[in-house]
Image (cartoon, rainbow, N blue to C red):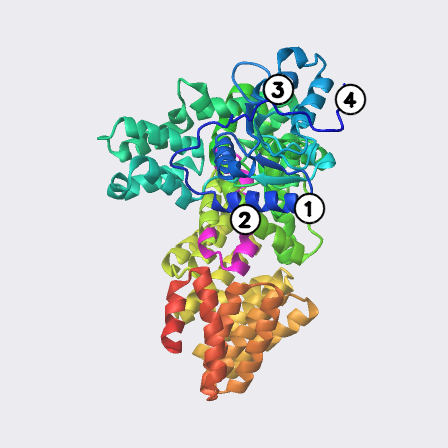
Amino acid sequence: MPEPTTPLALPAKPRRLPPEPTRFVGRDAELDRLDAALHAAQAEGVPPVLALAGAGGVGKTWLAVRWAHRNAGRFPDGQLFVDLRGFTPDGAPMETSVAVRGFLDALGVEPSRIPTDLHDQAGLYRSLLADRRVLVVLDNAASAEQVAPLLPGGRSSAVIVTSRNALRPLFVQHDVHHERLPPLTADEAEALLTARLGAKRVAAEREAVAELVALCRGSALALALVASRARLRPGAPLAGFAAELRESGLSALDDDDPAISLPAVLSWSYDALPPERRRLFALIGLSPGPDLSREATASLVDLPPSAAAQALRGLEEASLLEQDDRGRYSMHDLVRVHALAVADEALGADEREAALTRLLDHYARTAHACDRLLAPHRQPLPLPPPARGALVRPPAGTAEAMAWLAEEHPNLLAAQESAAVAGEHHTAWLLAWGADSFHGRCGHLRDRVLTWQRAVESAEHLAEPMPLIRANRFLGRALAHLGRHRAAVVRLHKALALAEAGDDRSERAHSHRMLAWVRCEVGDDERGLADARLACDLFRDLDQPVWEAAALTYRGLLTARLLDRAAGRADCEAALELYRAHPNPDGEATTRHYLAAIEHGDGRHREAVGHCAEALRLYRGLHNTNMTADVLEQLGEAHAALGAEDAARAAWKEALVLYEGQGREDAAERVRRVVE
């Protein structure tokens, strides 16, 4: 039926909005953006189409109805509302023809005037709304195809659509303002509980309220369900509801009414997915870290990166995943719990184990490739091939390696714990190795200790002795950096004993080198010098000049302390000569750092400043903020000895900022006393 060129008379002015939500809280920014989008579209003469997308239970309908009531006065010719039943427990989404027919009925069209064909029905609907101001709320839409015939044709009416899907095809033909609704903030969640339970009850149990807010993770439905149960039991402590949610997880948010059961709401989203995306959804539940890159996802699901990216976009459009500005994907905690339950039910144990192994191998092998760039003089590791399907793309350079490790750091920590629990002990050890240089450069000292503690535990399950020797040695170094020198010496002696038992001269040399450094740090200079001499001799016999230079550096500082500053200086200069022949910026920076200490102790403060400046240049080039802080403190001391107080304070202040950022409280307090 062709659309008339003049507006048809509107038989009725419908007022079909649901009741305005009571005790509505938060979403001020979203409400303001929706208002602004409406005003902008009307000013430009564009039909206003507003779309709200978000996970089930996040509060889309609540917000849409609130906004509709807030703006109802702008649409005096009526307001229409329909639940399109895109995600429900009892069948398919509503047919568009049913929705159009309902709108025509609401507009007062006599049944005899309603065409039988959907196209003609939609034409009549648009004709009735042409040049009239009607607000249309399309709630719980399944797809753009379901929505498109329900959009008015004129510019005076407006539409707001809610859906768990992004409805991307709508964007092609219509100027759509899209809002992806995030979970409620902690403040908004607390305000919701306060509005429903009363300020007095909330104030009386602050800790329980904080735990409820944390456990509900910003889900409006979860918070509303908890609040409704608490209101039915006004004398019950809120701590009891928090304990139930903590212990029972998602099942505590179940209800006989599926419309207000969070597990049911999430299951409808899952059921609407095609099979390949259901598998991805389940597998993501197995991921131990907080987010996923495209490459990590490709490894997890054993797909090419392009196919993995397409599948991720599908879950994002279904509001089961969120993509941040970095292009990384994360899953709401409650959605993740549901995904893990689906994985346990829908996937076999072998498939779950293989997927986790691929993901862990992706993290461990890529981290190892990064570490090879950051510490090229480390002893190479003999590694078996990665699991089939694990994607490993070595970075192009040190900057890219540092960026990848920084991006994936939380995932690497979670992956190591998961590997240890799963019995993937070599992978757990390798993850500590791969993250070690990054931890050292960035001052993640506690994480360094944690990863090597786990590595020691995992290495004890391995038949080969080398991983256990190195895990003890690196744990000793990590403990020493935290000031736990006694525990460090115990670990280093353990590494040395294992190396001697296995007649591993290289590992013996490294253990003596590390013992020399730790003893140097605590003033046990005589034993430290003995260790340094042994390390020098062993590395020279093994023809390992880079490590010989490192041992010479420790021998030089200890010799200067105990015997002869000139001889100590000569050892450090010899180390620099070796580094010139075998470049190692990290080692050279350490030698400059120690030479500065020798010169400062000898009253040659200008020379100390020069060595500090060169060490800073090298450490900053390596993005080693941990050692940068130490050298800045040393530089401040040298400047102060020269009477350059402003330069000294500037160096100390910069060191203080780094110490505080690294959580090195003892060092920070030491510098703070000098600065203040």
The alpha-carbon separation of the residues under discs 1 and 4 comes to: 27 Å
Within 10 Å of the Cα at label 4, are there few (<14), some (14-19), or many (20+) other Cα atoms?
few
* Magenta segment includes 21: no
Left or right placement of residue 101 versus residue 306 in this view: left
Left or right: residue 568 compared with residue 278? left
The residue beneath circle 4 is 2
Under mark 3, the amino acid is Leu
Which quadrant: the C terminus?
bottom left
Q: CA distance from mark 4 to mark 3?
A: 17 Å
Q: Three-letter amino acid code at disc 4?
A: Pro
Residue, disc 1:
44
Residue picked out by circle 3: 104
Under mark 2, the amino acid is His
Q: Which residues are magenta?
A: 419-447
Callout 1–callout 4 Cβ contact below 8 Å: no
- Residue 334 to residue 518: above or below: above
Mark 2 to mark 4 CA distance (whole Å): 62 Å
Disc 2 designates what residue?
409
Residue under the point 53% across and 31% down: 285
Q: How many marks?
A: 4
Query: In the rendered structure, which amino acid carries the disc numbered 1?
Result: Glu
In the image, residue 569 lies at what x, y percent? 54, 80
Q: Give neighbour class at mark 1: few <14, some 14-19, many 20+ (Cα, 10 Å).
A: few
The numbered mark, 3 or 2, whose residue comes first in the sequence reads: 3
Q: Could you tell me if the residues under marks 3 and 1 are in contact, i.e. CB atoms within 8 Å? A: no
